[in-house]
Amino acid sequence: MFFSFYADNADTLYDAALGTYDLNLTAVVADCLNKDPKEYLPILNSLRGLPHVKRCFSIDNSLKKWARGVKSLLEDASVQINEITKYIQRHQLFPYALDLLAGNSVSQARSPPEITSIQRAIQDSYGEYLETHDKLREASIFYKRAGNLPKAFDCLGKTGAWECALAVHEDEDPEQFKKLSRDLLHSLQQKQVMLLKVSVHSTPIFWICLEFCFHFCLGMGKCCSFM
């Protein structure tokens, strides 16, 4: 009677059984549903030949259970980082994957340094995704967490948040920091950020030059060029 309830949609029950990862149960359900053994036995036999974690991923992927697929990939120590990030990017599961890595679900399969590397790769990929969708401030946060400071700086610079952009690089090498400050200054000049009606001493361009280019005359000279 239970199986007859699913008679009109046998695939639903079969997929539910397969989703338990119990291949013996799946074979019994398939037989009770009068499915053709030629259709399901080769699939089940192929799955039996896989290691458990790869079998789980193959099943998750075939059932389009992408979130469970991410978990299976993370728990498989043989899967490379680029393969994981591509799968996560394809199915847009960045927050879910980061939550998994923040918990204990994959700690037994991978070492702490490897988990950190995966987190940074996903954060960098998420930053790229957010940037392409014009969510620049959010993108800068994930770029910074990933250690991709130039991209975080660039995203904040594009929004005009120059103080935040410079704060991202405040611990950088002085020469590198000076170069980035000049790059941001040029970006602000191109966008004509300074409002002519506002005092020169309250403009972003003035303070970037004065505080972060390490030369008072350079700062005043840049500001005067706009007067």
Image: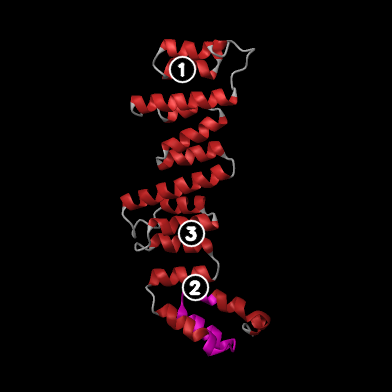
Q: Position of residue 106 (x, y in %)?
A: 38, 57
Q: Main secondary structure of the magenta part?
A: helix
Report the disc number at residue 20: 2
The magenta region covers 17-39
Residue 160 image position (x, y, % from top left): 56, 27
**Which quadrant does the N terminus fall into?**
bottom right
Task: Check disc 1 and report the residue beneath it.
Answer: 209
Q: Report how far apart the C-alphas of labels 2 and 1 lie in the structure.
A: 62 Å
Looking at the rendered structure, the secondary structure element under dot 1 is helix
> The residue under label 3 is which amino acid type?
Tyr
* Residue underneath mark 3: 87
Q: Is residue 114 left or right of residue 130?
A: left
**220 is higher (above) or lower (below) than 156:** above
Residue at the spot x=63%, y=14% of the render? 196
In the picture, measured across the screen, residue 209 lies left or right of residue 196, that is: left
Magenta span has 153?
Answer: no
Q: Residues within 10 Å of mark 2 (few under 14, many from 20)?
A: few
Quadrant in which residue 200 is drawn: top right
| Residue 15: quarter of image | bottom right
Of 220 and 114, the residue lying toward us: 220
Asked if residue 28 is among those painted magenta in the image, a careful observer would answer yes
Q: Nearer the viewer, residue 62 or 82?
A: 82
Callout 2 secondary element = loop
Q: In the image, which is nearer the foreground, mark 3 or mark 1?
A: 1
Callout 3: few (<14), some (14-19), or many (20+) C-alpha neighbours within 10 Å? some
47 shown above or below 60: below
Disc 1 crowd rating (10 Å Cα; few below 14, some 14-19, many 20+) is many
**Residue lying at 46% horizontally and 14% vertically, measured from the top left:** 219
Q: Which residue lies at the image location 41% right of the left edge and 19% below the top edge?
A: 213
